[in-house]
Image (cartoon, rainbow, N blue to C red):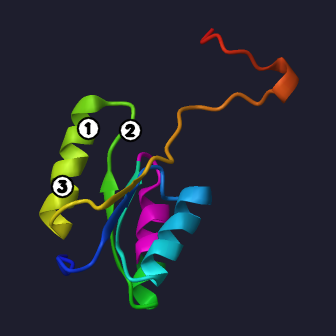
Amino acid sequence: MSGSTSRRTTLITGASRGLGAAIALEQGAVGSNVAINYFNSSDAAEQLCQRIRQVGGYAHAFKADARSEVEIVRLVREVTDVFGGIDVLVVNATGPQPFLSIEEQTWSSS
């Protein structure tokens, strides 16, 4: 799939669900090429691509672990190959989140 090079391309990390998916839908609605990054949720990412395409948008799913420099380099190359470049980056992916109240959280990594 190849999008028009005159469209703005938005890469959204962690876009297969939640806030990332909502951002992807909005970007598709305003006419952007949407690069949907996912790590585990390929079915959710493909369903999101279909939703964007059904409303006339352009979307493609890309698997990559946002914690890996090697995979991010590959992700950027793949998005560039499909859409011709990246104009907007939404850094939405996060690692595992602890289920702690705000009072229980600390700045330490342990």
- The residue tagged 3 is 78
Percent of width and height locating residue 74:
19, 44
Q: Residue at x 21, y 78 (%)?
A: 3
Compared with 21, 33 (above or below) is: below
Q: Contact, CB < 8 Å: mark 2 with mark 1?
A: yes
- The residue tagged 1 is 71
Asked whether, in this view, residue 91 is left or right of residue 5, the answer is: right
Q: CA distance from mark 2 to mark 1?
A: 7 Å
Mark sitting earlier along the chain (2/1): 2
Percent of width and height locating residue 57:
38, 84
Percent of width and height locating residue 28:
43, 78
Mark 3 surroundings: few (<14), some (14-19) or many (≥20) residues within 10 A = some
Q: Quadrant of residue 104?
A: top right
Type of residue at label 2? Ala
- The residue tagged 2 is 66
The mark found on residue 5 in the picture is: none
Secondary element at tag 2: loop
Mark 1 surroundings: few (<14), some (14-19) or many (≥20) residues within 10 A = some
Query: Quadrant where the N terminus lies?
Result: bottom left
Magenta-drawn segment = 39-49
Q: Quadrant of residue 34?
A: bottom left
Percent of width and height locating residue 108:
64, 10
Type of residue at label 3? Glu
Residue 84 located within the stretch drawn in magenta: no
Q: Residue at x 22, y 32 (%)?
A: 70
Asked whether, in this view, residue 100 is left or right of residue 44, the answer is: right
Q: Residue at x 50, y 63 (%)?
A: 44
Type of residue at label 1? Glu
